[in-house]
Image: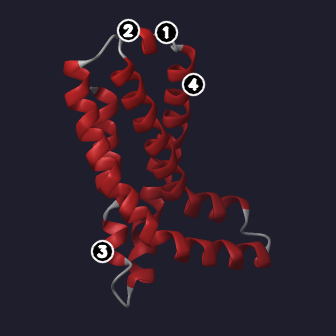
Amino acid sequence: MIWGIALVLLSIVAVPSLLLSKKPNAKELLEKVEPYQGWIGIIFCFWGIWGIITAILNLGWLSISPVWWVTFLAGNIVSTGLGFMLGSGLINKFFLSNNAAARVKAEELRERIAPKQGKLGLLGIAVGSWMIIASFLFSVA
């Protein structure tokens, strides 16, 4: 259930980007929110990777509760994706600040993925909610 709650909270952080990407001054607003999104994104990206590893290490759950295992894996894939998208701005800021060409390409990439981040955030809310429900119905851990 904790994984589902965390995914819903992460998704709520990601959804405002969908709203901000529709506004003309979205770049300024996204820059204000960027430091918080970055750190939250990096943490959840690693947590999602850990969840994927946990799902793979517990393949035995497939024979006991396949619905829960698939739900757990899907939730962690979405969490990793959202975490990566949210953390990409901070990664670019720290690791690409010295290379102007790489920074320009990173900013272009960020502009392209901002709308997808919101859609993935909405998917994350749905999958996270299902993870909470499924933890009561199918959980083995």
The image quadrant of residue 90 is bottom right
Question: Disc 3 versus disc 2: distance between alpha carbons?
Answer: 41 Å
Between disc 1 and disc 3, whose residue precedes? 3
Name the element at disc 4: helix
The image quadrant of residue 121 is bottom left
Q: Which residue is the site of mark 4?
A: 53
Q: Where residue 38 sits: x, y (%)? A: 50, 56
Q: Nearer the viewer, residue 94 or 76?
A: 76
Q: Which residue is the site of mark 2?
A: 64
Name the element at disc 3: helix
* Residue at image location 49% in from the left, 28% down from the top: 51
Q: Given this view, does label 2 or label 4 mark the residue nearer the observer?
A: 2
- Mark seen at residue 19: 3
Q: Amino acid at mark 4?
A: Ile
* Residue at image location 49% in from the left, 9% down from the top: 60
Q: Is residue 68 above or below residue 108?
A: above
Question: Disc 4 versus disc 1: distance between alpha carbons?
Answer: 13 Å
